[in-house]
Amino acid sequence: MIVLITGASSGIGEASAWRFAREPGTELILVARREDRLRELAARLPVPATWLAVDLTDADGPERVLAHVQEHHGRLNCLVNNAGAAWRATFEEGGWENVRRTMELNFDAQLRLTEALLPVLRESAPSSIVNVSSTASRISRPGAGAYSASKYALTGWTDSLFFEERTNGVHVGLVMPGFIATEGFPATELVANTLTKWLVASPEAAADAIWEVGPGGVAERYVPRFFAIAGFVRILWPALARRLLKGGMGKHLVTKTGADAADHVARQSGSSGSQAGPADS
Ligand SMILES: NC(=O)c1ccc[n+]([C@@H]2O[C@H](COP(=O)([O-])OP(=O)(O)OC[C@H]3O[C@@H](n4cnc5c(N)ncnc54)[C@H](OP(=O)(O)O)[C@@H]3O)[C@@H](O)[C@H]2O)c1
């Protein structure tokens, strides 16, 4: 089984690489911007792995990933669309620009990569696509509108693609993590508080869910499973969801992110904060 994981240089993507590596016969393709991380991970994994350092928002990003798959592997049995980030801001603070950059990475990049790789996935069927969305794709919090917009879009599109690709032998699965402690989403505020640290799950739990909704053939999974309650409450009792989130609870549940920290460092040093790593293995 040949598996491509985006965002494999840290967090849920890296944990997924280790999870898939437990399955006999797996070959991995690791994709993200930080080449050093990918090379080191590929060397430590107990299965064959190649890597491609690419910014998935670049105009030629999907094309470069496709060329890598064709040159080094020829087939593809599972695509894990996991790369993503969140920049916290109210609409007043971040405006359309914050929505634009969030959509570009969390939504447009997933669609563009899927479009490029779908012909190979169909040729390699039975195969699967896993879209890593979020519980934030079923319920929004104040200060996280751009992130929710991108994840609602990703979930909506995934639900549709699930039906469309059935006849082509491509299973399309959805993972909706809640709070998972990673570099990008450290959830430090929640982990530090004894009343809330039980809300935070591990990247390994998300990786297990990714395996289940990909090769495992399950349609969708919240991580942890009880986060499904958030989606149910939003649909079945919206007034309650609003009452809970418009008070202090809404703000407490919007944790600082790694992308915010990178922006802060970039502002201090006067650079753009973006990273690039055009390399190929
Ligand atoms: N952790 C949570 O609480 C949580 C909750 C719900 C959903 N999620 C979703 O889970 C996914 C993984 O997040 P994570 O928690 O594992 O965060 P993470 O540790 O920050 O991982 C994000 C990954 O995306 C890659 N990435 C970011 N921008 C990229 C770009 N332009 N091109 C290529 N790769 C890029 C990063 O690698 P490079 O920097 O090397 O490019 C990194 O490997 C995201 O889609 C996130 O929205 C996470």
Image (cartoon, grey):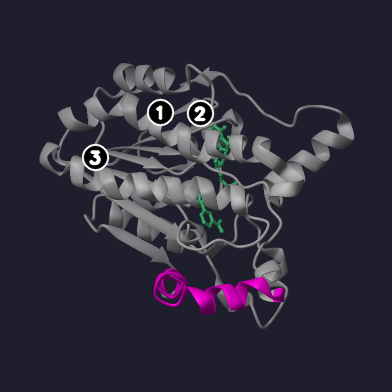
Residue at position x 32%, y 16% in the image = 71
Q: Compared with residue 227, is residue 120 higher up or lower down, i.e. above or below?
A: above
Q: Is mark 1 within 8 Å of ligand 1?
A: no
Q: Which mark is residue 1?
A: 3
Label 1 to label 3, Cα distance in Å? 23 Å
Label 1 to label 2, Cα distance in Å? 9 Å
Q: Is disc 1 in contact with disc 2, using a CB cutoff of under 8 Å?
A: yes
Specify start and end residues of the magenta stretch as a single range. Answer: 227-248
Label 3 to label 2, Cα distance in Å? 23 Å
Front label number (1 vs 3):
1
Q: Tell me residue 25's x, y (percent).
A: 24, 42
Q: Residues within 10 Å of mark 1 (few under 14, many from 20)?
A: some
Q: Which residue is mark 2?
A: 56
Q: Is disc 1 in contact with disc 3, using a CB cutoff of under 8 Å?
A: no
* Residue 230 is covered by the magenta coloring: yes
Q: Which residue is mark 1?
A: 112
Residue at position x 68%, y 82% in the image = 194
Q: Tell me residue 75's x, y (percent).
A: 23, 27
